[in-house]
Image (cartoon, rainbow, N blue to C red):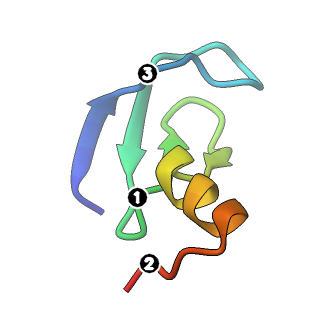
Amino acid sequence: MTGIVDRDEPCRHCGAIAGRELADGAIECVTCGSVAPDPFVVAKRSLGVSSR
């Protein structure tokens, strides 16, 4: 974990703005604990681009 960050979009589950950035770029909500994947990683996977 890298620390507390402000999210670009509120949590889909509880609406909180604060989150923890995880090592893979995902954001974990500090309020409810839900994890949202990094949108750039999701986009790369949908395009078939390797993240390495």
| 20 in relation to 43, above or below | above
Which residue is located at x 37 percent, y 86 percent? 52
The disc labelled 2 sits on which kind of residue?
A: Ser
For marks 2 and 3, give the CA distance: 22 Å
- Residue 24: percent from left, percent from top: 42, 69
* Mark toward the start of the polypeptide (2 vs 3): 3
Camera-near label (2 vs 3) is 2
Marks 2 and 3: CB-CB under 8 Å? Answer: no
Q: Earlier in the sequence, mark 1 or mark 3?
A: 3
Circle 3: element type: loop
At x 77%, y 25%, the residue is 13
Q: Mark 1 points at which residue?
A: 25
**Residue 29 occupies which quadrant of the picture?**
top right
Q: In this view, does 52 lie above or below 42?
A: below
- Amino acid type at circle 3 is Asp
Task: Give the image location of residue 1, x and y in percent.
Answer: 30, 63
Residue 51: numbered disc = 2
Q: How far apart are marks 1 and 3 (CA)?
A: 13 Å
- Give the labeled residue for mark 3: 8
- 48 relative to 50 in the view: left or right: right
- The crowd level at tag 1 (other Cα within 10 Å; few <14, some 14-19, many 20+) is some
Give whichever of 32, 28 is nearer the camera.
Answer: 28
Q: Position of residue 8 (x, y in %)?
A: 43, 21
- Residue placed farthest to the left in the image? 2
Q: Nearer the viewer, residue 25 or 52?
A: 52
- Label 2 crowding class (10 Å Cα cut-off): few <14, some 14-19, many 20+? few
